[in-house]
């Protein structure tokens, strides 16, 4: 059973460590920035599975003050959307279906017509690209971002 529970101060060390372990696929994150992001986020949650913390997720809804160029790209084009900024599943929980269950939960709770995200395309994050395409996400653009390129994806939810 997947459970998304709000990130608390007690979770900051784990969230920052997960982010740092995957920073090449995400973006650097400090405690100060994490606090700011939580304040802007639609979802700022720890992924808990079978009584263990298994990762974290941050999403932002249209109208958020989030300052990411990737989020802003979607904000300029969609009046209503949810944007998945980052998700990390601890390697101990990979290939268990946990990511699929988290996405199912996030998409069901979105309450908007479209769910958006980006995936590194240069260099390519092939597992993520395959996962999102399999879930019905389609590419709608590309952007340079922090020394690499990302593909922008959307999934209609209604």
Image (cartoon, helix red, strand yellow):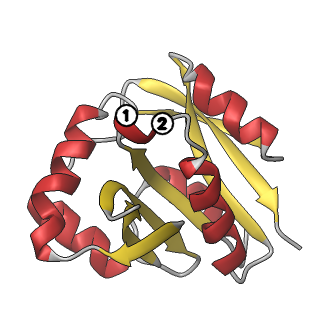
Tell me the tag on residue 44: none
Question: In the rendered image, which quarter contains the N terminus?
Answer: bottom right
Query: In the shown orientation, is residue 32 left or right of residue 123?
Result: left
Q: Is residue 148 above or below residue 141?
A: above
Look at the picture and state if 134 lies above or below 84: above
Which is more toward the observer, 24 or 62? 24
| Rendering coords of residue 5 (x, y %) | 37, 76
Indicate the position of residue 143 as horizontal and vertical percent values: 58, 36
The answer to whether any part of residue 34 appears in the image is yes
Please tell me which residue lies in front, 150 or 19. 19
Using the image as rendered, state which of residue 112 and residue 4 is in the foreground.
4
Q: Image height check: is 124 above or below 23?
A: above
Residue under the point 54% across and 58% down: 84
Label 1 close to label 2 by CB (< 8 Å): yes
Residue bearing the label numbered 2? 94
> SS for tag 1?
helix
Find residue 99 and report its horizontal and vertical position in percent: 56, 49
Q: Is residue 30 visible?
A: no
The one of 116 and 129 positioned closer to us in this rendering: 129
The quarter holding residue 76 reads: bottom right
Kindly give the residue lying farthest to the right in the view shown: 158
Q: In the image, is 31 to the left or to the right of 79?
A: left
Q: Which picture quadrant has residue 148?
A: top left
Location of residue 145 by image quarter: top left
- Mark 1, Cα crowd under 10 Å, few <14 / some 14-19 / many 20+, is few
């Amino acid at each position: 059973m997947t459970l998304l529970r709000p990130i608390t101060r007690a979770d900051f060390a784990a969230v920052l460590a997960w982010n740092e372990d995957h920073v090449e696929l995400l973006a650097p994150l400090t405690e100060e920035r994490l606090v700011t992001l939580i304040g802007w986020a639609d979802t700022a949650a720890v992924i808990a599975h079978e009584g263990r913390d298994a990762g974290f997720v941050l999403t932002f809804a249209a109208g958020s003050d989030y300052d990411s160029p990737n989020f802003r790209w979607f904000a300029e084009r969609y009046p209503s959307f949810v944007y998945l900024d980052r998700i990390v599943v601890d390697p101990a929980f990979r290939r268990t279906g946990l990511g699929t269950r988290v996405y199912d939960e996030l998409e069901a709770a979105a309450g908007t017509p479209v769910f958006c995200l980006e995936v590194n395309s240069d260099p390519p994050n092939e597992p993520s690209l395959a996962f999102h395409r399999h879930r019905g996400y389609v590419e709608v653009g590309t952007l340079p971002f922090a020394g690499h390129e990302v593909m922008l994806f959307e999934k209609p939810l209604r």
